[in-house]
Image (cartoon, rainbow, N blue to C red):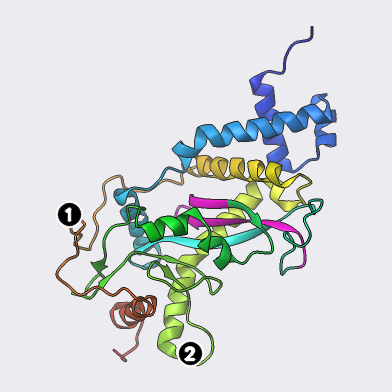
Amino acid sequence: MRLSISPEERFMVTLRFLATGQSFSALHFDFLLGRSTIAVIVRHTCDMIWQHLKEQMMPQPNREDWLKISKGFKDSVDFPNCIGALDGKHFRVKKPPNSGSRYFNFHKFFSVVILALVDTEYRFIYADIGAYGSASDARIFRSSRLAQRLQENSLLIPPPVALPGTSGPLAPYVMVADAGFALSKHVMRPYPRRSIDDRKQYFNNRLTKARRYVECAFGILANKWRIYQTTIQLQPTFVTSVLKATIVLHNYCRIHEGGTYVDDEFQINHVVNPTGEPMSHNSVTSGLQIRNLFTDYFNCFDDNNNSDDC
C-alpha cells in the first residue's frame, strides 16, 4: 500500500491552485498526482479552510466592532457613522451545463458574484458568495442574509447618534454603496446625475472616497489569488468553495501583513446611549432624509469644503 498524501502537501497543492490559477493538468506535472485526485484535494481543502477560519477571520461584528469600523472611516475619509463599503463583483466562470442565461451578465460573459461589505483595512466583514451573474447587485443584496438581518435589526448596529459637531437630528450608522443599490435607512447611494447641484455633487464625491475601499479590496483579492484572473473551469458548487476559501485567506493575509486597526483603545466623538434606547434628539428614518442630513453635514461642517451655502 502506498503512503497517503500528507496534509501539508494537500494544503500546498490547494494554495498553488488558488495563487496561480493553474489547471489541474498543470498541477499534475508539478506534484505527480492524478488530476482527479487534485480536484478532490482542492475541493476538500477549500471547504476545510472555510470551515475552520470563517469564525476567526470573519466573525459576526458586535457593537464595539461596528464602532471601530466607523472610527476607521471617520479617520481615513472623514465619513462619520459609516460601517462599511458595499459592492458586488463579477468573476468569470465557464458556462455551467444546462444553466441557460442565469450566469450570463450584462458585461456579456458568464460569471458568479461576490457581494461584500468591507472596512478601511480592506478586510471582508461580510460576503455573499456564488450568486448568479445575471442578478443585479440590488437583487442579490435584497435576498442576502445581511439584508435580512438589517430588517430584523439583529446586526447589533449601534443606535443613531448626532454627527460630529452637531446637536441633532440623530443619524443612523450606514453602509456606502454605488447607484446599483436602493437607498434605505442603512444604505447610502449617490444622488442621480440628472438635476444635480454642487451640494449633492460634493456628497457624491465624499461617498465615492469611502466606497473605494471595497473596490480596492476586490483588487487586492484578485491580485493575490490569481485564480480570479482566469476563467474558472469548475462547477458552480466547486466555484463557491474556492471563493469562500480565498475570502477568509484574504482576511488572514490582511491581518498578518499589517492590516489591523491602529488602536485597540478607541474613542468615539459621538455620545452613544449605552442602553441602546432612543436619545432625546429627533431621529431621521427615511433614506432620503438621511442622505440629505449627510449632505448638509458635509457642506456645512466639513473643513475641506468652502461652501457658504449652509
In magenta, the rendered stretch is 108-128
Q: Check the image and name the residue furthest to the left.
A: 280
Tell which of 286 and 111 is nearer to you.
Answer: 286
The residue under label 2 is 196
Q: Residue furthest top?
A: 1
Taking the image as shown, residue 57 lies to the left or right of residue 297, namely: right
Name the foreground residue: 95 vs 2.
Answer: 95
> Given the image, on which type of amino acid does mark 2 rest?
Ile
Left or right of 67, for residue 203:
right
Amino acid at circle 1: Thr
Front tag of 2 and 1: 1
Q: Is residue 230 above or below residue 301?
A: above
Q: What is the quadrant of residue 5 in the picture? A: top right
Give whichever of 140, 190 is nearer the camera: 140
**Label ID, residue 275:** 1
> How far across and down, in percent of the image, does residue 208 sit?
49, 72
